Image (tube, grey):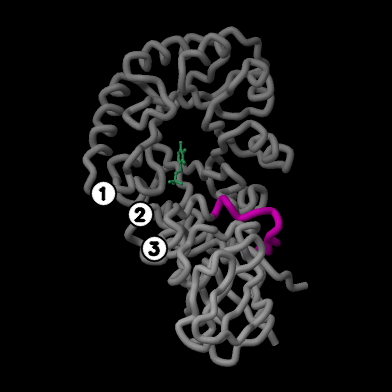
Amino acid sequence: MSYTTTAHINLNALQHNLARVHQLAPGCRVVAMVKANAYGHGLLTIAHALEHVDALGVARIHEALKLRQAGIKKPIVLMEGFFEAWELPIIAENQFDLVIHQVEQLQALTQARLTSPIRIWLKLDSGMHRLGLPPEQFITAWQALHKSVNINPDIILMTHFACADELANDYTNQQIKLFNEMTADLPGSRSLANSAAIMKWPATHGDWVRPGIMLYGISPFADKTGVELDLKPVMTLRSRLLSIHQQKQGDLIGYGGTYRCPENMPVGLVAIGYGDGYPRYIPAEGTPILVNDKLTQVVGRVSMDMIYVDLRKISQPKIGDFVTLWGDGLPIEYIAQAANTSTYELACGVTSRVEFVYNSTMSQPS
Ligand SMILES: Cc1ncc(COP(=O)(O)O)c(C=O)c1O
């Protein structure tokens, strides 16, 4: 069966991207970040396909429970830790790993009555100022945890970078230096690197790397596409031509009449809109799109269920022709740039109305 609007998920590409992680950070253990529905790619299918990673990273406990309920036995790291004490017995029973990032968590954790000790990832705020203990609290927190029967004595030491995607920015060096100073006298494995650091900051690789966006074939850098970094797109978002109109020179297109036809021209309607996660804030012309694998542009304003496409360069377009919004043949980085947003937001934003098709070959119209 062929659906109108589909996200094709290529699990071979996922394996290729994981192999790139292993190639770039040889010998490191890998926590694959699958939070936010595996960056919009489908939590369970992606997690099952990642059988060769050492752990999975999620933000919320319900994401972790979904993985366990689906039979995933690997370590699962709760990257935001726990919010309330009642979560702790569930975390211990399910053998979830736990990020500790603030002193408020210490008392509840050391006083809880747990069936088994929890493995902790102790997070230092080395400069991002999101989650993490400030340097002056880090060592005392480690000591308090290390004494507690509730905690596996092998505490993993971690931090997260604010600017690793900016190669000329010295801030990452400052974060590395602070992390190294604060952890110099502590035993345990180290974990610092996200995708950008895996690719460009080898000094940060430590013992565990935490790739997210690169696993999905997307570049963490503003000036490079995933393909240019030898990654393969995992998601290809596709739809079809719903209708074709011959417009006259001067005709206005769509809500707000934001595009004026510069000449007599064919304009197509494509069955996708912001209700599917295609960004509304692209400009009235210029965003690339493929029709029958040929490059053209989106015109007019994106509406909930439809967008308009300039068909002047497409030979003999027909209703039902295939359209690619991003993915194979059209880097998502270009769409993020046009919409003035991030690739992360685009991938996470694909809505539940879109049909997900895993590893199938993409059918062409007959
Ligand atoms: C703590 C942590 N580690 C790793 C990652 C993965 O980052 P990226 O997707 O840039 O590789 C994230 C994502 O935000 C994160 O929050």
* Along the line of sight, the residue nearer the viewer: 93 or 358: 358
Which residue lies at the image location 65% right of the left edge and 10% below the top edge? 113
Disc 3/disc 2 C-alpha distance (Å): 8 Å
* Along the line of sight, the residue nearer the viewer: 7 or 306: 306
| Circle 2: element type | loop
Q: Position of residue 345 (x, y in %)?
A: 51, 50
Q: Quadrant of the N terminus?
A: bottom right
Label located before the other in sequence (3 or 1): 1
In the image, taking residue 83 as reference, residue 209 lies left or right, namely left
Q: Which residue is mark 2?
A: 221
Which residue lies at the image location 61% right of the left edge and 55% below the top edge? 350
Measured along the vertical axis of the image, is residue 285 above or below residue 135? below
Q: Is mark 3 within 8 Å of ligand 1?
A: no
Tell me, yes or no, whether the two marked residues, 1 and 2, touch with CB atoms within 8 Å.
yes
Q: Which residue is mark 1?
A: 167
Q: Position of residue 68 (x, y in %)?
A: 69, 37
Q: Which mark is residue 225?
A: 3
Q: Which mark is residue 278?
A: none
Highlighted magenta segment, given as a residue range = 347-358
Magenta-span inclusion, residue 174 = no
Residue type at mark 3: give it. Thr
